[in-house]
Image (tube, rainbow, N blue to C red):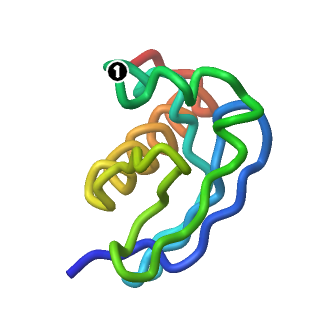
Amino acid sequence: MLEVTYARHLGDYTVLLRFNDGIEGPVDLKDALWGPVFEPLKQVEFFGKLTLSESLGTITWPNEADFAPEFLKDKLIEQRDSHAEKQRGGVK
């Protein structure tokens, strides 16, 4: 079962994450903040109040918003791959 084992707010809507399968890196969640439960997170001050829930295995906020670990890992890999492609001069 995939779980987030470490999380730290880096600023704006970016979180440094580590997963129990060894994958780690920053993920920008700005584009994922849609829907009523995520509306408060659009305020950076509130977004920064994230915590790691060991019982849920993911990051959560005081209003009980959370993201599935699988979603977070997919976003991290997608963003990392996109960044690598741009570094190589390609377009994605």
Percent across and percent down for residue 82 are 47, 32
Q: Nearer the viewer, residue 12 or 56?
A: 56
Q: Residue at x 46, y 49 (%)?
A: 76
Relative to 91, 35 lies left or right: left
Residue at disc 1, secondary structure: helix
Q: Position of residue 57 (x, y in %)?
A: 37, 74
Residue 50 to residue 23: above or below? above
* Percent coordinates x, y for residue 86 in the rendering: 57, 26
- Towards the viewer: 86 or 67: 67
Q: 7 left or right of 3? A: right
The total number of labels drawn is 1
45 vs 42, left or right, is right
Question: Which residue carries the number 1 mark?
Answer: 36
View extreme (left): residue: 1
Q: Residue at x 40, y 27 (%)?
A: 32
The quarter holding residue 7 reads bottom right
Residue at the front extreme?
63
Q: Residue at x 55, y 45 (%)?
A: 27
Q: Quick one: label 1, few (<14), some, or many (20+) residues within 10 Å?
A: few
* 17 shown above or below 62: below
The quarter holding residue 24 reads: bottom right
Q: Is residue 84 above or below residue 54?
A: above
Instruction: Kindly identify the residue that appears in the image at 48 percent across and 43 percent down.
Output: 63
Q: Is residue 70 above or below residue 46?
A: below
77 horizontally vs 5: left or right: left
- The C terminus, quarter of image: top left
Image location of residue 10, percent across then percent down? 77, 48
Quarter of the image where the N terminus is located: bottom left
Query: Considering depth in this image, is 12 or 74 the residue closer to the camera?
Result: 12
Q: Tell me which amino acid carries mark 1.
A: Pro
Asked where in the image residue 51 lies, by quadrant, the reply is bottom right
